Amino acid sequence: MNKQQNNNSNNNSNNNKKNNDMSGLKHEKLLDREYQKKIVERKKRFLEDLKTEDGVFDNRTLLTLHGLLNGKHVDEFLGIINSGKESIVFSAIKENKYFAVKVYRVSTCDFKTMWKYIQGDPRFHLRKSSTRQIIHAWVEKEYRNLKRANNYVNSPKALLRRENILLMELISDDNGGAPSPRLKDAVNVDYSKFYELIREDLKTLYNDAQLVHGDLSEYNILVKDNEPVYIDFSQGVVVQHPLSKSLLIRDIKNICNFFKRKGVACDYKKLYKYITGEELQPIDEELANNY
């Protein structure tokens, strides 16, 4: 083969390689466009479905949810995890990581109760002016409570708050898909061991985090890796709050009632003393009962 033939052969080989590269690039771009199109269509369908949720998604909330997508905080909303009177929780995903998106229902929240928890909190100085401001403060309060709890006990990592929306870590199985079960629904639980773990966590929350959960029960303790994970800190208060003792007593009674049903010996007065270092005073218990 002469030099000219060799050059022609090399040129043909290079051209074929370029053509293959271009073809591969076009194919990748086509696949990427198709993938993006499917993602956009799924987002649109999901957001359209959200509009059917009565009393949850006003236009402002929809715009905020769009903002989570546009800001690339999440790639996609997956579906509803839990739906209650005052809030609804969705699962979402970003780069194979799963998140929980909690949306407070603007039209059905109990603003009087929210205000009662907020106005005694030394971290907030809010004038009772508008329902939306109260909701924003409520979300901010849950965000701050989670941030504080994150440093001391197992709880979802608080990531972001926007108006009536809170973005946090999803507590789920190892694959990330299925949310971890509530203590109420969990199976194969060593209740004696679990009580001891919760007992220590409540003491840590009170003395170190200076925080009272405020709405603790078997419904908002999850079970993951045989350990408790505490969720729903919206009603949580710092120990300086005038309602902190009443809420702590209520939490303790809820916990003891559950574990006694599971055959675990639990005395709420002893638990109160273990956590606070003080005897439970009859007047405090009476205030908690009337609260």
Image (spheres, rainbow, N blue to C red):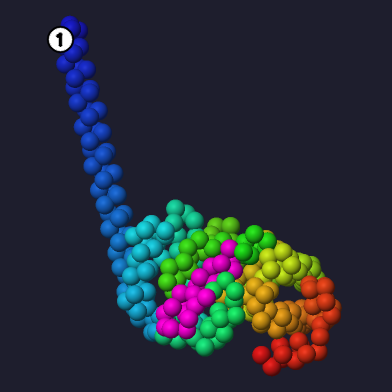
* Residue 158 lies in the magenta stretch: no
Q: Which residues are magenta?
A: 125-147
Residue at the spot x=68%, y=61% of the render? 152
**Considering the image in quadrants, where does the C terminus appear?**
bottom right
Q: Nearer the viewer, residue 98 or 144?
A: 144
Measured as percent of width and height from the top left, residue 60 is found at 34, 75
Numbered circles on residues, count? 1
**Considering the image in quadrants, where does the N terminus appear?**
top left
Residue at the spot x=66%, y=82% of the render? 243
- The answer to whether residue 153 is left or right of residue 51 is right
Residue at the spot x=74%, y=67% of the render? 207
- The answer to whether residue 124 is left or right of residue 21 is right
Measured as percent of width and height from the top left, residue 41 is found at 29, 64
Say if 139 sits above or below 117 in the image: above
Q: Nearer the viewer, residue 75 or 126?
A: 126
Q: Amino acid at mark 1?
A: Gln
